Image (cartoon, rainbow, N blue to C red):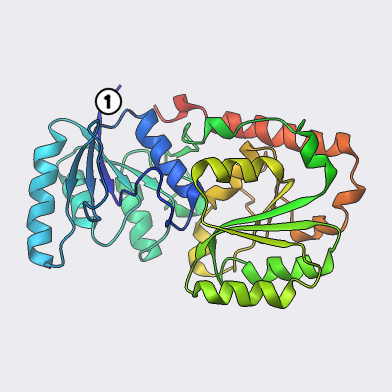
Amino acid sequence: MSEFVLIGTLNRRDLKRGASIAANNFHWNAIDLLQIKRIISINSQEEFNNDRLEIGFLYTTHKMKYLWKSIMLLSRMYRGHVPIFYNIEWYTIHLLLWSILMRKRPRVIALDLSINSILYKILLYLSHRPIILRSKFLLSNAQDHVLFPGFLSEDLVRGSSNSLKESRTRCLLCGSLGPNTGLENFCELASIYNEMEFHIAGIPHRIQESEIYKVIDKYNVNSNIVYHGVLSRKDYRNLLHMCNLGFSLRAENKENKYNFPSKILDYISAGLIPISSIDYNEFANLRIYSPELLSRYNFLEIQERETIIFGNTSALKEYNKYERFL
């Protein structure tokens, strides 16, 4: 197997202030699975202490110093390794172009569209078999790419036999919480469906935490909204396993059009039925529902729910085969 040097923003494995535990899990699962030992990190060195990894930190506010230092660091650290970029950002484009020109066959894990979409697609086209969550990232339908290559949390996978799940319907919204990620829409549903519990976990996104409490107070007329704040990995996993329905209520803006929420993958892995405000038509094998399911969920037979969960987890395992990456 090829050895890799990973380039991107590295967060601690147990980070509690990140926007998404699901996204951080995906990142570290990639590091573990690919047995990556060398990382070039764009963020600062604080709080990192890992003897297993050789980490080169590039954090600096001096642009010219950053450009020179980053190229020298990549030249030193790759040493025959394959560069693999965790997302394409403005501050790593030059490293990706350098890798392409030097014929290092760089690979890209494309989760977020953070730059011009045409430029993004061209860079993915020039990279070798990009790892993507949505086919909208690609410049050409014939482009060779990989979906979900074994980077999902194996410790989340379970069936729907948890008796606690059947005692009461529990809905979950996790990740970044704000105006573009469905916080208010989720809380509004809680004011309508008083017989259900609505759980929220994550951090503010483009709002203050005080505003999260204001939204919850506005709609918590049935006292059925529970805000957990930022959770540890263990507590996040436990919350997933006690819930039935997992929500992704993103606004249909350009940024979200190209993203596929990694939280949906965690929902399915943990045996939740996923509910999304955006259609992901390229994943025909995954049954992802619109919020209208909520009005009839309690009328679904238990057997039907288990069929949905079994079908989704089976399909996800096919996407998640590590061999697809190779």
User: In the rendered view, would you say 261 is above or below 193?
Assistant: above
Q: How many marks?
A: 1
Q: Is residue 153 left or right of residue 246?
A: left
Residue nearest the viewer, comparing 59 with 238: 238
- Position of the C terminus by quadrant: top left
Q: Residue at x 20, y 31 (%)?
A: 81
Residue 99 is drawn in which quadrant? top left
Q: Is mark 1 on a helix, strand or loop?
A: loop
298 sits to left or right of 5: right
Residue drawn at 39 percent across, 29 percent down: 33
10 Å neighbourhood of mark 1: few (<14), some, or many (≥20)? few
**As shown in the figure, which amino acid type bears the numbered disc 1?**
Ser
**Viewer can see residue 272:** no
Find residue 176 and report its horizontal and vertical position in percent: 52, 61
As displayed, is residue 317 above or below residue 305? above
Residue topped by disc 1 = 2
* Residue at (18, 58) in percent of width and height: 59
Q: Quadrant of the N terminus?
A: top left
Residue 42 picture location, percent across and down: 24, 54
Tell me where residue 74 sits by quadrant: top left
Give the x, y percent position of residue 307.
80, 34
Image coordinates for residue 264, horizontal then vertical, percent: 60, 48
Asked if residue 211 shows in the view, the reply is yes
